[in-house]
Image: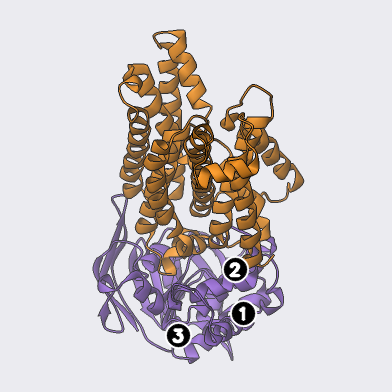
Amino acid sequence: MSPLRLNLALGALMAILFVLSLLIGPAHLGPITSIKALIAGGDEASRIIMREIRLPRALLGLAVGASLGLSGAVLQGFLRNPLAEPGIVGVSAMASLGAVLIFYSGLAGASLYALPAGALAGAFLAVLILLAIAARHGSTLTLILAGVALSSLAAALTSLALNLSPNPFASYEIIFWLLGSLKDRSMMHVAIAVPLIVVGCALLAATGRALDAFSLGEEGAESLGIDRKRTRFLVIAGTALAVGAGTAVTGAISFVGLVVPHMLRPLTNRMPSSLLVPSTMGGAILLLAADIVARVAVSAHELNVGVVTALIGAPFFLWLIIRSRREIF
Amino acid sequence: MIEAQDLSVDLSGRRVVSGVGLKLEPGTITGVLGPNGAGKSTLMRALAGQLASSGHITVDGRDIAQLSYAERARLIAHLPQARIISWPLTVRDLVGLGRMPWQGMSRAFSDRDRALCAEAMAMMDVTDLAGRPATELSGGEQARVLAARAIAQDTPVLLADEPASGLDPAHQMTMMAGLRKLAVKGRALLVSLHDLTLAARWCDRILLMKEGRLAAEGTPADVLTQERLGEVFGIVAHIDHDAGGMILAPVALADREAGP
């Protein structure tokens, strides 16, 4: 498929899902009423539902999904590993840990900003540790191993917090949050996350040329005039900002960054840079769709979108591997 | 032209290249030979500006440390020993990566870019493979495709790390003939080889390395003597001559009798 046609098709699908996301919810507003309430105001209840409940939810679905899709594509290209995902460098796990510690310490009640702040702090701590390690030993393998170690440590500390949590309610809160959700997010969450996601995605998008060169390995990339250190910085800082800010306001949402690049790669010329724009839109599409499913799949009981992405993502990924045993990219 | 003076490289606290001086002249192929671990690849990476080194490297009179990454890539192409192809890019797209240092942000291919890629593919006999995914090729085919990438980079200096290893005999000739064509066009080439006959017949000069140092340097006939081969490689070789140059065949370890 030509790159233009692919991007146009994905853009159209993304727009349709964004509008659908605005129109679906437990309050039965007709499409016309919904759009009117969103744009012109209308009656008080519809306006609040549209502007303060559905709009932030759809915007976050779009932004967080896009950041997960893009960071997945960038990490796979940078690490030359089709199994890489935002989780692999440990940023998601550390962001989760940061949020859990806020819950555990009881600070979550103190301020609306406490939880996102904790998750962002975790993400940035992960980045600082990764940069300190990666700057001294520049190899890709070192970065992956550092990510695995960070993830394991974060998972262990998160489990410890759950073990020691003061009451069942706190455990429940922690678990619920770890499953990831776009529910009950406000425009404040959008205001916190989206600017950081945009900056992060801009850094990630700047790696396209370098990622293509990395197809020839690290030495090959250097021989094509690529600054490895600069690329590494862009990848790590971009991932931390984009994924950290997303995890901060929606919790852990898995598999989007892993599956989307896989689905779209066969439709491109396989150059890592060709995959960046499609994966960004593909991530948004998958998360918006998953969030719609989460709302309508079980009547009177909303699912966590992180559960839905895992339920869609994991079997799909397995199927991909089985379908093409010869090569998984 | 590339020139290095008193070049030393330490990797993890160990001196891998020690006090090497060399000069690669335009229009010549310089072969670098030596046992495994002699420092050949490290020397090449240092010359390509990829490793911190003490000493002084200049390309066309300019200090390599002062060059930007892109400027360096327009002067020196480096064909790494590790043959890495990470995604099933077509051969055409992979060779096209060689034009990256010359392209602007849009990465649009000019007619000149396309012509240089086509020429490089023809030189390495991979034109027929242009539409194939590079990951599905044989090892020897991949080696030639990667060499075509470095050749398409169209730089005054080419550093090729074991470009001929793993190639069938005919394609070893294709490879060396291609490199010779580049030399005729005025390029300066440094090529590491393990095949002594290939080195003797195709290289204008030979650098013989042992334990990070230059053990000998000069024309193939001067450098590749029975005595030096014993010293550096620890082998006894059968040395013969024909109209095309020397023929060297290792026949035994130096501390044993010649013959199987």
10 Å neighbourhood of mark 2: few (<14), some, or many (≥20)?
many
Q: Amino acid at mark 1?
A: Met
A229 relative to A175 in the view: left or right:
left
Q: Chain of mark 3?
A: B
Extreme-front residue of the structure: A43
Q: Nearer the viewer, residue A214 or A12?
A: A12
Q: Which residue is mark 1?
A: B121
The amino acid type of the residue labelled 3 equals: Asp
Spatial separation of the CA atoms under disc 2 and disc 3: 23 Å
Contact, mark 2 vs mark 3 (Cβ under 8 Å): no
Q: Which chain is purple?
A: B
Q: Position of residue A131 (x, y in %)?
A: 33, 45
The percent coordinates of residue A300 (x first, y second) are 65, 22
Q: In this rendering, which labeled residue sits more in front, label 1 or label 3?
A: 1
Where does the image place residue A254, in percent across and percent down from the top left?
55, 36
* Dot placed on the residue nearer the N-terminal end, 2 or 3: 2
Indicate whether A72 appears above or below A100.
below
Q: Secondary structure at mark 3?
A: loop
Chain that appears orange:
A
Quarter holding the C terminus of chain B is: bottom right
Q: Nearer the viewer, mark 1 or mark 2?
A: 1
| Residue visible at 57% across and 45% down in the picture | A35
Q: What is the distance, in whole Å, between disc 1 and disc 3 at their CAs?
A: 25 Å
- Which mark is drawn over residue B143? 2
In the displayed structure, does residue A18 sit left or right of residue B191?
right
Secondary element type, mark 1: helix
